[in-house]
Amino acid sequence: MAILFHSPWDNADQWLAALRMALPDDEIRVWPAVGAPEEIDFAMVWQIPHGVLAGFPNLLAIASLGAGVDALVADPDLPRHVPITRLLDPLMADRMAEYVCAAVLHHHLGLDVYAEQQGREQWRRQPARDARDRSVALLGLGQMGQRCAHRLGGLGFNLLGWSRRARKIDGVRCSHGPDRLHRLLAMADIAVVLLPLTAQTTNLMDQAAFDLMRRGSYLINCSRGEIVVEDELIAALDDGRLAGATLDAFRVEPLAAGHPLWRHARVRVTPHIASLSAPATAALILADQVRRARTGQPQQDLVDVRHGY
Ligand code: GLV
């Protein structure tokens, strides 16, 4: 039997090297050079074209090479009877937490303001604010959200959290369900989007949400671009409702040349790197999933296709 691999991202070679090391006795076939489809029993994929996975009759499991599975579950021909897993690698949660802490601290310390002042050669101290007086709302309290909470809590921020279902997390004022989101946004100085993309979260951060946020508050999106209505965000930035935004995900990626977000003075853009998969550690997790699938043990970190994550 053989393993199917597909990733259009630029770290595919790193992935293949790590997987070959973790699975030395396995044949890894890179789509579209898959050979006989019935020989494929395990798929490790990222952004595989829709319809492809339906062509392998003997799949035991499908593993996402990332934490998000929105692109996978959007495939109308996805073989839904096959177990599908997300990649939950503690190292990716650490990477996410580092990114979020950096973005929160950047805004908290006024570093954008000082960068503007430097451009004008202006020496002027802005009023400082204590971390405990700054409320950070984490939207999404899964593995990533919890790691961010842990790190931001260590820095002293006042933490609020929101998720689809009820959660209890030390040091975080948690709320859940659609009715509570707007109340939470009204209390936040910084909102961090870490939610999976689902029918419920698409366009969640829209004008109505920005209107509720405190004047001068800040948005960080490390999830999926489709959760934020980009032109309504730009309007909220332009009229000062939001002080700024750090965005790592966009509705269309790569962000198109000339897109207004590239050059917006109060937007920081990164190319979807907040929680890059780490092939060296992830390959060990995936090798274990292959072993489980072939010995009839349940897969870890299963996706609930009905909920979309
Ligand atoms: C990246 O976006 C991921 O889902 O892992």
Image (spheres, rainbow, N blue to C red):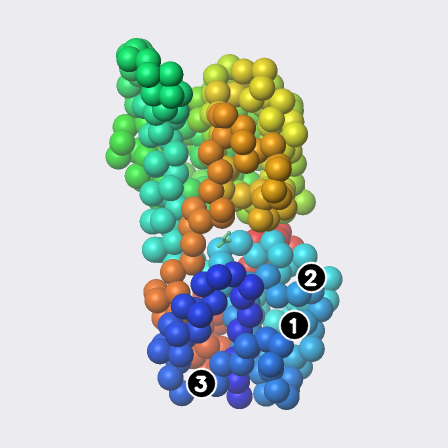
Quick one: SS at disc 2? loop
- Crowding near the residue tagged with mark 2, few <14, some 14–19, many ≥20 C-alpha atoms within 10 Å: some
| The CB of the residue at mark 1 lies under 8 Å from ligand 1 | no
| Rendered location of residue 233, percent (x, y) | 60, 27
> With 286 as the anchor, is 62 left or right in this view?
right
* Mark 1 or mark 2: whose residue is earlier in sequence: 1
> With 287 as the anchor, is 75 left or right in this view?
right
**Residue linked to disc 2:** 75
Q: Are marks 1 and 2 in contact (CB under 8 Å)?
A: yes
Badge 3 amino acid: Asp
Specify whether residue 75 is in view. yes
- Crowding near the residue tagged with mark 3, few <14, some 14–19, many ≥20 C-alpha atoms within 10 Å: some
- The residue lying at 55 percent from left, 59 percent from top is 303
Badge 1 amino acid: Leu
- The residue lying at 34 percent from left, 36 percent from top is 102
Quick one: SS at disc 3? loop
Outermost residue toward the right?
Answer: 76
| Rendered location of residue 151, percent (x, y) | 30, 39
Q: Is residue 147 above or below residue 288?
A: above
> With 2 as the anchor, is 168 left or right in this view?
left
**Residue linked to disc 3:** 26
* Mark 2 or mark 3: whose residue is earlier in sequence: 3
> With 120 as the anchor, is 182 left or right in this view?
right
Badge 2 amino acid: Asp
**Residue linked to disc 1:** 53
Query: Disc number at residue 281?
Result: none
